[in-house]
Every structure is written in structure tokens, then in C-alpha cells.
């Protein structure tokens, strides 16, 4: 895609079954969004995973709207080119269609281009109402961290006929409701391929194998910044935690030993002013 142009929903839809896959990464703040955007990432997902990797919650369940709004504002200030999609946190869309629309509008006003909700046929009305209100929606089926953790933990989905059929019908239902793409999380590759063939919108996989139109991962996982959970589907491209540890140890050493600051980091008074100052002090 043209790195100078803002990515649109139309561009994303064109990626279905294309030669080049969609690149999606999460970001939650200005500097990381700036770096993702600059590198040419297609979609920056302001995921509720930020609650875990940035805010230190044990799951995504406690994440609140005010926290998501803070993340979205920072990410939008660092982004020119990537399409921004923000997760609707648990509790921000469950109660009613009106609640879903009101909260999605808040995320859009904070700077997101689209929103993502977890769920299938049970959220059809909410997704449709959002799309009818002019808000682009990304679906999310398979493993749904906002609720799966309460039922059965983080487990592979689509291993049985019943589970596979549910995922396929959920994806079709989301497509009918008007989503522009669907995240499939931790779904067996066989089912991912069937889902992908059943819908016209791009499938973005996370732990769902190779038969997707794009891939999404959590930024802090690929950079080696979050080590509390290390799913097998993550590829780590950098050990940033180790590099930060080395940098901080060097800083501690330099400050303790007096090696930092050096003259390079120090400001001085003009010598004449300093002489005058000394004179006045001596007189006093
Ligand atoms: O919150 C998140 O980061 C997500 C991705 C893992 C898809 O929903």
C-alpha cells in the first residue's frame, strides 16, 4: 500500500484473497503508534490487551472506556497512515444497542477510525446498529478473551464439529451485519480456511495459521516486552526487555560512579556573569 496515504476501509476490503497480506499490530501510546505507522503497518489495533501489557491487569476484563479513550487519543496523535481500530472493552457494549453506539462514538471522537467487538451472532444487532450509524466495525470470533477466560481459559477453538460450525456461522452473521474484517483468534487452520472461504471480508488471524488475509499480534509480545504470557503462536522479533535491562544497568552504574553527567550534558554561566556573581557574593 502507498505509505504516504491514509489507509481506508476500501483498501482493507481489497486485501481479500490478495497476493499481499494485511499487517496488523497493537499499539497503545504515541511513540509506539508513531513507529508502527512509520514502518508501514496497515492497521493499528488499540487492543484491550493494553490493559494487560501496559496497565498490568491480569486479563482484559477490568479494562474501562476511560482507559481505552486515553490509549486511542495517544495512538491517533502518532498515526498518519495506518487505519486505527479500537477495541470496545468488556462492559461497554453488552447492555444495549444504545450503549454500544454511544461508546463506539466516543472511541471514534477520540481518534479511532473503526471499532472491534468480540462476539458472533449474539451481537448481530449491535454490530448492525454501529455500521448503520456510520462506524466501521471489525469482528472478533474464535477465542474471545473478554469471556473465554471465564469459561475455559485461553484454548484453541474449532477443534470439534460443533465448535467449527459455530465459528463459521458467527463469521457469516458478522458479515451480514456489515463488518469490514474479522479477527479469528486461536482457531484451527482447517476451520480458518473454511471461514475464509465462507465470507467476502478479510480474515485477520492471531494463532489461526496461514490461511488468513492478514495477521495481528500484540506489539509487546513481538518486541519481547511482555513475558507473563508467551503463547506458542507469537514470534518474538526482539528481546527489548533484555536490551532495556542492559541500558538501565549502565545508567545506574554511570550515575553511581559519577560517569554521568559529563561536561557534554552540563550547562555553564557565561564566565563574566559568573565572576560578577562571585564578587557580589564575596561582598555580602
Ligand atoms: O486486544 C487485542 O490485542 C486483540 C488482539 C489480540 C486481536 O484483540
Image (tube, rainbow, N blue to C red):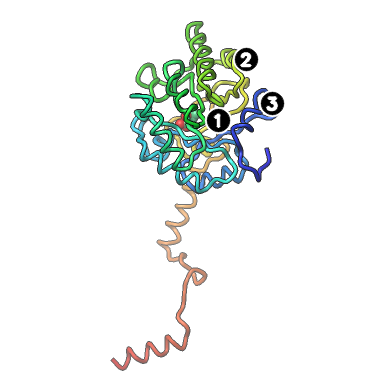
Q: Mark yes or no: residue 7 visible.
A: yes
Residue at x-position 50% and y-position 16%:
173
Q: Position of residue 209 (x, y in %)?
A: 59, 21
Quadrant location of the N terminus? top right
- Residue at the image point whose x is 45% and y is 57% from the top: 251
**Mark 1 neighbour class, 10 Å CA radius: few under 14, some 14 to 19, many 20 or more:** many
Give the residue displayed 48% in from the left and 6% down from the top: 162
Res 235 → quadrant: top right
State the residue position of label 1.
216
Mark 3 lies on a secondary structure that is loop
Q: Nearer the viewer, residue 10 or 75?
A: 10
Earlier-in-chain disc, 1 versus 3: 3
Question: In the picture, which quadrant includes the C terminus?
Answer: bottom left
Q: How far is disc 2 from disc 3 in space, using C-alphas?
A: 13 Å
Structural crowding at the residue carrying mark 2, measured as other residues with C-alpha within 10 Å and reported as few (<14), some (14–19) or many (≥20): some
Foreground residue, 169 or 106?
A: 106
In whole angstroms, how far apart are the C-alphas of marks 1 and 3?
Answer: 17 Å
The residue where tag 2 is placed is 197
Q: CA distance from mark 2 to mark 1?
A: 19 Å
Query: What is the quadrant of residue 6 in the picture?
Result: top right
Residue 244, compared with residue 90, is above or below; it is below
- Would the CB of label 1 be found within 8 Å of ligand 1? yes
Q: Secondary structure at mark 2?
A: helix
Q: Earlier in the sequence, mark 2 or mark 3?
A: 3
* Badge 2 vs badge 1, beta-carbon distance below 8 Å: no
Secondary structure at numbered mark 1: strand
- Residue found farthest to the right: 19
**Residue 18: assigned label:** 3
Q: Give the mark nearest the N terminus, 2 or 1.
A: 2
Amino acid at each position: 500500500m502507498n505509505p504516504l496515504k491514509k489507509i481506508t476501509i476500501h483498501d482493507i476490503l481489497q486485501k481479500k484473497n490478495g497476493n499481499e497480506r494485511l499487517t496488523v499490530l497493537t499499539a497503545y501510546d504515541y511513540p509506539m503508534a508513531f513507529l508502527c505507522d512509520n514502518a508501514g503497518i496497515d492497521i493499528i489495533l488499540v487492543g484491550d490487551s493494553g490493559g494487560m501489557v501496559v496497565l498490568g491487569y491480569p486479563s482484559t476484563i477490568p479494562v474501562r472506556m476511560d482507559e481505552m479513550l486515553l490509549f486511542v487519543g495517544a495512538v491517533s496523535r502518532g498515526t498518519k497512515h495506518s487505519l486505527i481500530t479500537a477495541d470496545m472493552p468488556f462492559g461497554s457494549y453488552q447492555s444495549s444497542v444504545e450503549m454500544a453506539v454511544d461508546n463506539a462514538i466516543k472511541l471514534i471522537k477520540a481518534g479511532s477510525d473503526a471499532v472491534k467487538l468480540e462476539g458472533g451472532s449474539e451481537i448481530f444487532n449491535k454490530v448492525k446498529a454501529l455500521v448503520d450509524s456510520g462506524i466501521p466495525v471489525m469482528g472478533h470470533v474464535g477465542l474471545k478473551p473478554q469471556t473465554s477466560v471465564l469459561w475455559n481459559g485461553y484454548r484453541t477453538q474449532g477443534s470439534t464439529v460443533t465448535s467449527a460450525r459455530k465459528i463459521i456461522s458467527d463469521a457469516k452473521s458478522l458479515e451480514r451485519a456489515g463488518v469490514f474484517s474479522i479477527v479469528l483468534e486461536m482457531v484451527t487452520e482447517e476451520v480458518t480456511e473454511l471461514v475464509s472461504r465462507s465470507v467476502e471480508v478479510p480474515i485477520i488471524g492471531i494463532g489461526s495459521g496461514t490461511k488468513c488475509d492478514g495477521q495481528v499480534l500484540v506489539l509487546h509480545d513481538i518486541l519481547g516486552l511482555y513475558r507473563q504470557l508467551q503463547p506458542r503462536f507469537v514470534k518474538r522479533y526482539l528481546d527489548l526487555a533484555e536490551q532495556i535491562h542492559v541500558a538501565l544497568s549502565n545508567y545506574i552504574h554511570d550515575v553511581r560512579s559519577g560517569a554521568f553527567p559529563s561536561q557534554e550534558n552540563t550547562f555553564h554561566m557565561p564566565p563574566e556573569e559568573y565572576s560578577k556573581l562571585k564578587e557580589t557574593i564575596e561582598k555580602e
